[in-house]
Image (spheres, rainbow, N blue to C red):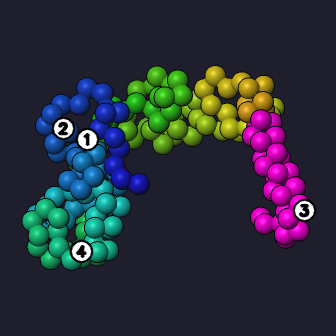
Amino acid sequence: MPGYNIDRFVDMSESERDEMQCSICQDILRDPVVAPCCLQMFCEQCINEWLNTETTCPHDRKVLKIDSLTRPPRALVNMLMNLKIRCDFQESGCNEVLKLGELTQHTITCKFMDSICQLCHCEKLFKHNCVESLLDLINKMNKDNQDLKRKLELATNDNEPVAS
């Protein structure tokens, strides 16, 4: 997974954005690592994917190997973890803004997290309605059933084997 979408961050200065941005995905760093050749930071996944096909640093084009990447200084990680970010489930209705370092724990317990409805076993989203979800499912199943009946009728009329 590349970095965190830059638009999710609140009250981030331009200099913070510039320092905490992965130069590959252009998002805010996720699991940052440092290239020793230029001291540039990248998302771990971004640079690993880059180095699976390339042998040079995307920033300064010097030879770079995965095993030479290092973790950034603790002070920088602390700055990153203190950035304010909106919840993963903002589009589902969660208005929480929290520190990036608190995001994982919040995501696990967020009441807006997508899950399975205990009543109808459908995917539960914000403002979920079991009746509407089940009606959609019934309509889809009826359509699939009609399509299968048509195929069976055509196959039996033409004495052809039933195609799946």
What residue range appears in magenta? 137-164
- Of badges 2 and 1, the one in the foreground is 2
Q: Is residue 139 magenta?
A: yes
* Amino acid of disc 1: Met
Residue at horizontal 35%, vertical 33%?
Answer: 8
Q: Amino acid at mark 2?
A: Glu
Mark 1 or mark 4: whose residue is earlier in sequence: 4
Residue 74 sits inside the magenta stretch: no
Report the side of 112 relative to 67 (left or right): right
Tag on residue 16? 2
Among the 4 quarters of the image, the one containing residue 121: top right
Q: Could you classify mark 4 by the number of other residues whose Cα lies within 10 Å: few (under 14), some (14-19), or many (20 or more)?
A: some
Q: Residues within 10 Å of mark 1 (few under 14, many from 20)?
A: few
Q: Which residue is mark 4?
A: 54
Height in image: 96 above or below 36? above
- Sequence-wise, the earlier of marks 4 and 3 is 4
Q: Position of residue 45 (x, y in %)?
A: 35, 61
Pair 3/2: label in front: 3
Question: In screen coordinates, is 54 left or right of 108?
Answer: left
Classify the position of the C terminus by image quarter: bottom right
Crowding around mark 2 (Cα neighbors within 10 Å: few <14, some 14 to 19, many 20+) is: some
The residue carrying mark 3 is 156
| Distance from Cα at disc 3 to Cα at disc 2 | 69 Å
At 62% from the left and 31% from the top, the residue drawn is 125
Q: Is residue 15 above or below residue 35?
A: above
User: Residue 59's image quarter?
Assistant: bottom left
